[in-house]
Amino acid sequence: MTIKEAQELVDNWIKTYGVRYFNELTNMAQLTEEVGEVARIIARRYGEQSEKESDKNKDLGDEMADVLWVLICLANQTGIDLEAALQKNLDKKTKRDNKRHLENEKLK
């Protein structure tokens, strides 16, 4: 699915099952919460912290999808075409950083 299709799917789901979008500030708080859940799994599963028994069955992919869901909601609410925004961002990074990482001694 394309990003545009994902934005349309989320919008249709909200209109069918969600009644309406939560306001932007509520969604921003939700996004922060969901990113925290991803961070917790990564810190404990891949970092130096030990993973709690209650976290061992957490699905990292599902938590990342929650982040994407709320981000798409915010994009829809604020009129952002995420596909176009991502392409513009990739173009900016390519122009700005096309040699930066290749020439970084720390990455070799």
Image: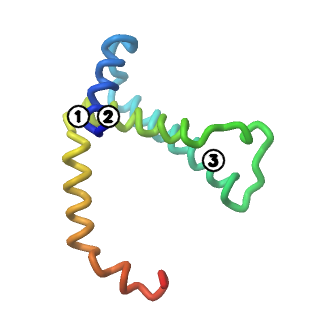
Q: Which disc is residue 18 wearing?
A: none
Q: CA distance from mark 1 to mark 2?
A: 6 Å
Mark 2 or mark 3, which has the lower sequence index?
A: 3
Q: Is 38 on the left or on the right of 104, as rendered?
A: right
Q: Mark 1 and 2 residues: CB-CB less than 8 Å, in contact? A: yes
* Circle 2 Cα neighbour tier, 10 Å, few/some/many (<14 / 14–19 / ≥20): many
Disc 1: which residue = 78
Q: Is residue 57 above or below residue 11?
A: below
Q: Residue most toward the front?
A: 1
Relative to 98, is 79 above or below? above
Where residue 43 sits: x, y (%)?
65, 54
Crowding near pointer 1: few (<14 within 10 Å), some, many (20+)? few
Residue type at tag 1: Thr
What is the CA distance from the residue labelled 1 to the residue labelled 3? 28 Å
How many numbered discs, if any? 3
- Residue shown at 45% from the left, 35% from the top: 29
Q: Position of residue 97 (x, y in %)?
A: 28, 74
Tell me which numbered mark, 1 or 3, is placed earlier along the sequence.
Answer: 3
Residue at disc 3, secondary structure: helix
Residue 77 sits above or below residue 37 on the image: above
- Say the numbered circle drawn on residue 74: 2
Q: Quadrant of the N terminus?
A: top left
Question: Label 3: which residue?
Answer: 40
Spot occupied by residue 33 in the image (x, y as percentages of width and height): 52, 38
